[in-house]
Image (tube, rainbow, N blue to C red):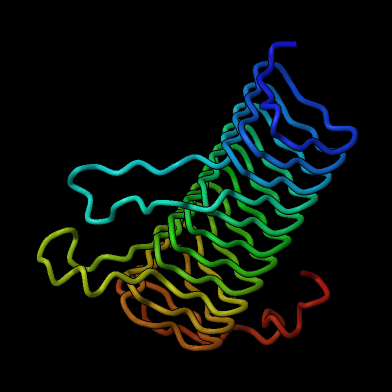
């Protein structure tokens, strides 16, 4: 079988590896893992037990930096870590210094950048992008083509619908003052964003706050309120039956 597995890599019991896979120096792979074809696992990466990694996945990729970029790639980035029982779809890219907790589903074509920390039992849908310096809690759902901008924080039990766009730069790459104001979005536990909504930089969606489909959020969303329109305005309260506290057994 055409593979490259470095002699320093540590392999658990009953690991199955596909064709053309490259496992580099000091990688650790737990027991009962299934690794597909054409996978590349970069040096030092740590994979837990019972992890499924589909074809063409890259784990531990180092970031690039343009000469024009205001952010330079730091040295000595820590290896990527993938928790036990994760499922990683085809063509996923997970960067160095990202920490993925247990029992996450990361669907085909998703990208998770460096300096990202993800809790457990999240669903990260097809072609989702999680940019750098993002913190994600537990039991969240990010649906197809959603985009989470850098410097964001997502707590627990949040929902992000398809094609949601978030942003972190009100100056749109002009005026040096922007360097003092980079900030992504914050979603408190139970916050929800509808399909194709846009959230502007630094905005907070409070607990059980809900953004309607197609809305443009230019100010914070209050707890338990539904916002809709462009610019989004308070529409009504979230129905009692939809509050997170009344749905914990369904999560």
| 132 lies above or below 107 | below
Q: What residue is rendered at 57% in x and 36% in y?
A: 42
- Which residue shows up at 22% across the image and 50% down it? 69
Q: Residue at x 61, y 31 (%)?
A: 24
Left or right of 162 in this view: 6: right
222 is higher (above) or lower (below) than 53: below
Image coordinates for residue 146, horizontal then vertical, percent? 48, 53
Q: Residue at (47%, 79%) from the top-left corner?
A: 205
Locate the C terminus by quadrant.
Answer: bottom right
Left or right of 139? Residue 215 is: left
Percent coordinates x, y for residue 56 in the rendering:
60, 27
Q: Residue furthest front?
A: 8
Q: Quadrant of the N terminus?
A: top right
Q: Residue furthest top?
A: 1
- Looking at the picture, tell me which residue is in the foreground, 71 or 232: 71
Q: Could you say which quadrant of the image residue 89 lies in?
A: top right
Q: Can you tell which quarter of the image residue 18 is in?
A: top right
Residue 152: x and y in percent read 44, 68
- Give the quarter of the image for residue 249: bottom right
């Amino acid at each position: 079988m055409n593979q490259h597995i470095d002699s320093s890599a540590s392999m658990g019991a009953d690991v199955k590896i596909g064709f053309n896979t490259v496992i580099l120096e000091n990688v650790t792979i737990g027991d009962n893992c299934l690794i597909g074809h054409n996978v590349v696992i970069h040096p030092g990466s740590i994979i837990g037990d019972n992890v499924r990694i589909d074809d063409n996945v890259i784990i531990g990729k180092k970031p690039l930096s343009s000469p024009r970029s205001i952010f330079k790639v730091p040295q000595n980035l820590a290896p990527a870590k993938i928790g036990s029982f994760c499922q990683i779809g085809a063509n996923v890219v997970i960067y160095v210094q990202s920490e993925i907790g247990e029992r996450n589903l990361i669907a085909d074509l998703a990208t998770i950048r460096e300096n990202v920390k993800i809790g457990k039992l999240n669903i990260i849908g097809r072609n989702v992008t999680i940019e750098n310096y993002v913190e994600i809690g537990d039991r969240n759902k990010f649906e197809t083509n959603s985009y989470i901008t850098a410097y964001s924080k997502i707590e627990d039990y949040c929902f992000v619908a398809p094609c949601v766009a978030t942003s972190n730069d009100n100056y749109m790459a002009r005026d040096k003052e922007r360097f003092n104001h980079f900030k992504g979005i914050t979603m408190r536990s139970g916050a929800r964003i509808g399909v194709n909504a846009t959230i502007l930089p630094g905005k907070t969606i409070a607990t059980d706050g809900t953004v309607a489909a197609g809305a443009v959020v230019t100010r914070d969303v209050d707890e338990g309120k539904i916002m809709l329109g462009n610019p989004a305005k308070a529409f009504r309260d979230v129905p009692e039956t939809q509050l997170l506290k009344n749905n914990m057994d369904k999560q």
